[in-house]
Image (cartoon, rainbow, N blue to C red):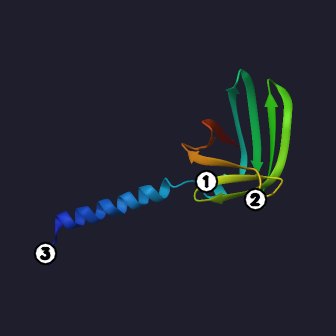
Amino acid sequence: MKIHYKKLLALSLVVIMCCVLLCACGISREDAVGTWCGSYVFKGNNFTVAFVLESNGEYSEVIYKNGSFSSAEVGTWEVKGGKVFLYEDGDMMGTRTEYKYKGGALVNNDHYFYKSN
């Protein structure tokens, strides 16, 4: 039996690339569950945001603007296509916020939210 090293090397590279792409495709539902926090500046105001993704598909979020309570919301969430979607008031046809998973953070509008322990 003759071994074709070039074919074996090519096949190995394809397998490695598939594994890399699968790992980089987003976040799983199990990994998304928990508390996520982040801070950013928008139009000269400092915002601090925390949201909790519950295992039952519900979420709650609080927003502080310049150190004072600004707003809160509740709704439902899901992972779809490796992204996290929050649906305010649980209305999947209404307002939604999309987060991409990047470098261990959920990212929306270049605002990074990190999972707290």
Q: Nearer the viewer, mark 3 or mark 2?
A: 2
Report the quarter where the N terminus lies: bottom left
Q: Position of residue 19 (x, y in %)?
A: 42, 60
Q: Nearer the viewer, mark 1 or mark 3?
A: 1
Rendered residue at 32%/62% (across/down) = 14
Q: Indicate the position of residue 97 as horizontal and vertical percent values.
A: 70, 48
The three-letter code of the residue at mark 1 reads Lys
Residue at mark 1 to residue at mark 2: CA–CA distance: 17 Å
Task: Name the image quarter holding the C terminus.
Answer: top right
Q: State the residue at coordinates (44%, 56%).
A: 21
State the separation of the CA atoms marked 1 and 3.
46 Å
Tell me the element at label 3: loop
First along the sequence among labels 3 and 2: 3
Q: Residue drawn 84% across and 45% down?
A: 73
Q: Earlier in the sequence, mark 1 or mark 3?
A: 3
As displayed, is residue 95 above or below residue 80? above
Residue at 70% over, 24% down: 43
Q: Nearer the viewer, residue 47 or 27?
A: 47
Most extreme residue toward the left is 2
**Residue assigned mark 1:** 83
Q: Residue 44 sits in which quadrant?
A: top right
**106 vs 93: above or below:** above
| Of 100 and 115, the residue lying toward us | 100
- The x, y position of residue 27, in whole percent, is 59, 54
Q: Is residue 19 left or right of residue 35?
A: left
Contact between marks 3 and 2 (CB within 8 A): the answer is: no
Residue identified by numbered label 2: 93
Label ID, residue 2? 3
